[in-house]
Amino acid sequence: MSATERRWQPHPDDWLKEYNNMTDDKTKVGGQDRARINLNEDYEVRDWAKSLGVTEDELRKAVAAVGNQADKVREFLKKK
């Protein structure tokens, strides 16, 4: 491989940085974490259910009905 071709190869550390940006980084909480309900994380289901005053099953049904945006789930649950 020539020096020019090597220059365009990504460094392994760059791939790792990219990969880490795509994973659920539990140290980064804020806007998006507060605005969406992730049913794939047990702790989020537990915490959201407690916060909204519903069972985990009721939370899952609400998310299935209106999507994972917290404000829409709150609205849906208020109507019930």
Image (spheres, helix red, strand yellow):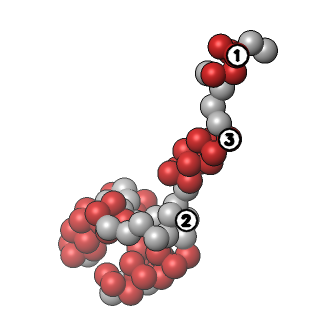
The residues tagged by marks 1 and 2 sit, at their Cα atoms, a distance apart of 45 Å
The residues tagged by marks 3 and 1 sit, at their Cα atoms, a distance apart of 17 Å
Label 2 crowd bin: few (<14), some (14–19), many (20+), radius 10 Å: few
Q: Which mark is residue 3?
A: 1
Q: Nearer the viewer, residue 80 or 75?
A: 75
Q: Nearer the viewer, residue 15 or 80?
A: 15
Label 1 crowd bin: few (<14), some (14–19), many (20+), radius 10 Å: few
Q: Which mark is residue 26?
A: none
Per the image, the residue denoted by label 3 is: 12
SS state under label 2: loop
Q: Which residue in the rendered view is the most extreme toward the front?
A: 3
> In the image, what residue type sits under mark 2?
Asn
- Side of 51 where 40 appears, left or right: right
Q: Which mark is residue 40?
A: 2
The residues tagged by marks 3 and 2 sit, at their Cα atoms, a distance apart of 29 Å
> In the image, what residue type sits under mark 1?
Ala
- The quadrant where residue 69 appears: bottom left
Label 3 crowd bin: few (<14), some (14–19), many (20+), radius 10 Å: few
Quadrant including the N terminus? top right
Instruction: State the residue at coordinates (54%, 70%).
Output: 41
Where in the figure is residue 33, as x and y percent of width and height?
A: 37, 65
- Using the rendered image of the protein, determine whether residue 62 is visible from the camera's viewpoint: no
